[in-house]
Image (tube, grey):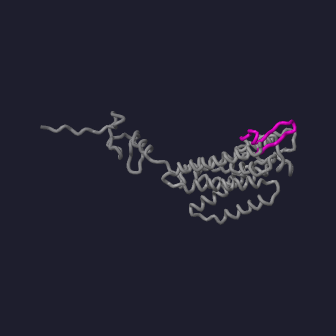
Amino acid sequence: MSESPPTTPVCYRHPGRETYVRCTRCDRPICPDCMREASVGHQCPECVNEGRRSVRPARTAFGGGTAGRHGYVTKGLIALNVLLMLLSIASDRGGDAAVGGSGFGGLMGGSTPLTNWGSVLGLAFFPDGTLGGIADGEWYRLVTAMFLHYGVIHLLLNMWALWVLGRSLEANLGPLRFGALYLIAGLGGNVAAYLFSAQNSATAGASTAVFGLFAALIIIERKLGRDISQVIPILVINLVFTLTVPGISIPGHLGGLAVGALMALVLAYAPRGRRTLVQVAGGAIILAVLLALVLFRTAQLLS
């Protein structure tokens, strides 16, 4: 009885193509068009796709995505602040804010219609007899104020700090966590300004969020076991300016610093097993407390 000649294997995806190469994962024959480079040998397209689905995306030490290394959120925040500075300049038709302010040829100080609209303002009576401010229902001011500036120098100082601090924090925390830190710290500083500033005084600027980033950088770097000796003197210098230079919102800066520190502690020390849940819950609790403080101050001003 004669034996039948051995059959030449054919590609499982292209039956008309003979091949002796097999997928190192599923052992099916694959032709050159179906070969995909693997760490060892070649794999078929289906095994490559399955491997991609089963591999968990890389995360930072605090649970964030590694896309934070590109600094997209930091760059986006800077772009938004610059855009609103340009709109602020454009809104001042015929006013003294040729480039967004009054002093030094319009580089600093002064207000524009846009800053008047979006700054933190407790409660004010306008010449036409109308009321305005957060206590009058303009709660949006607690958010918009952190993106508006009184002049180009004010903007440049804050954007330089955001660029230096933001890239490091975003790389360590990931885009979403860094964005939440920035917004909550900025909101916390604006709530503090609402609580402790005169009801008719207006404040604006990214400084509330930037001071929160200062506190966060110290906490995050310390958690990672890194040297923070170069950060603390810069923070101290900024605190001295805050306390001594007229016209700076002391409650806003200190409030942003405190709330930024609280949020950073939540992000840095959440237990790994329930990290995302604890981080989200911690952020929600901070927001709830800030909301309660806003309601308290509003009732106080309206009483």
Foreground residue, 29 or 223?
Answer: 223
Which quadrant: the N terminus?
A: top left
Q: Is residue 79 left or right of residue 116?
A: left
Location of the C terminus (image quadrant): top right
Q: Where is residue 210 in the image (x, y as percent from the top left)?
A: 69, 53
Q: Looking at the image, which residue is at 55% across and 57% down?
A: 269
Q: Residue furthest front?
A: 303
Where residue 182 sits in the image (x, y, percent)? Answer: 65, 50
Q: Is residue 262 left or right of residue 90?
A: left
Count all numbered tags in the image, as a single digit: 0
In the rendered structure, which segment of residues is drawn in magenta?
Answer: 119-139
Residue 21 can be seen, yes or no: no
- From the viewer's perspective, tell me whether residue 83 is left or right of residue 177: right
Pick whichever, 218 or 23, lies toward us.
218
Vertical placement of 238 versus 202: above or below?
below
In the rendered image, the residue lying farthest to the left is 1
Quick check: 62 above or below 121? below
Residue 268, horizontal then vertical, whole percent? 57, 56
The answer to if 132 sits in the magenta stretch is yes
At 79% from the left edge and 43% from the top edge, which residue is drawn?
123
Q: Can residue 153 be seen in this view?
A: yes
Q: Quarter-wise, where is residue 253 in the image?
A: bottom right
Instruction: Give x and y (percent) for residue 13.
Output: 36, 35
Q: Which residue is drawn at 68% across and 53% down?
A: 163
- Residue 241 part of the magenta segment: no
* Viewer-side residue, 28 vs 119: 119
